[in-house]
Amino acid sequence: MDLAANLYKEQQPALIPLAVKIINTMLAGNLTSLTEEQVAKYYRQDVLIWTLFLAFRRLDRWLTTKLFRRRYEFILPGRIKR
């Protein structure tokens, strides 16, 4: 599901139906099939989680560099086009 949902982030939502179809053919018989709606819901949740996570990392960077006047040891990603 994560692989199919990442197609949204990569600006390729037209490939999601094909990805869902391929994933469903690979699933074993006892697993429920994947739907495009499930992929979209998963992606919305993933966006929320990563947005919050990166916001807290930026806050940590600000506190470390501005308030505590120490060097921030990590590189943060730039804005992600979604």
Image (cartoon, rainbow, N blue to C red):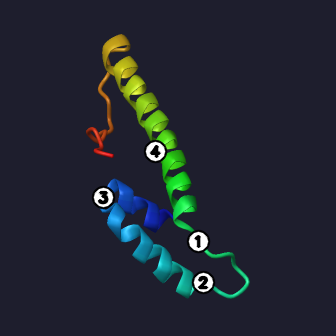
Question: Residue 82's x, y, as percent?
Answer: 33, 46
Q: Are marks 1 and 3 in contact (CB under 8 Å)?
A: no
Dot 4 surroundings within 10 Å: few (below 14), some, or many (20 or more)?
Answer: few
* Residue holding disc 3: 10
Please state which amino acid type lies under the numbered disc 1: Leu
Please tell me which of labels 2 and 1 falls first in the chain: 2
Q: Which of the numbered marks, if any, corresponds to residue 27?
A: 2
Along the polypeptide, which appears first: circle 4 or circle 2? Answer: 2
The residues bearing labels 2 and 3 have C-alpha atoms spaced at a distance of: 24 Å
Rendering quarter of residue 26:
bottom right
Q: Which mark is residue 53?
A: none
Amino acid at dot 4: Val
Report, in whole angstroms, how far the alpha carbon at label 1 lies from the one at label 3.
20 Å
Which residue occupies the extreme right position in the image? 30
Q: In front of the other: label 2 or label 1?
A: 1
Q: Secondary structure at mark 1?
A: loop
- Secondary structure beneath dot 2 equals loop
Whichever of callouts 2 and 3 sits on the residue coming sooner in the sequence is: 3
- Image point (33%, 66%), residue name: 14
Give above or below for 24 relative to 13: below
Tell me residue 63's x, y (percent). Answer: 39, 18
Element under disc 4: helix
Residue 34, numbered circle: 1
- Is 16 positioned to the left or the right of 10 in the image? right
The amino acid type of the residue labelled 3 equals: Glu
Location of mark 4 (residue)? 47
Residue found at x 52% / y 41%:
49
Give the answer, above or below, for where 70 lies relative to 23.
Answer: above
Mark before the other along the chain sequence, 1 or 3: 3
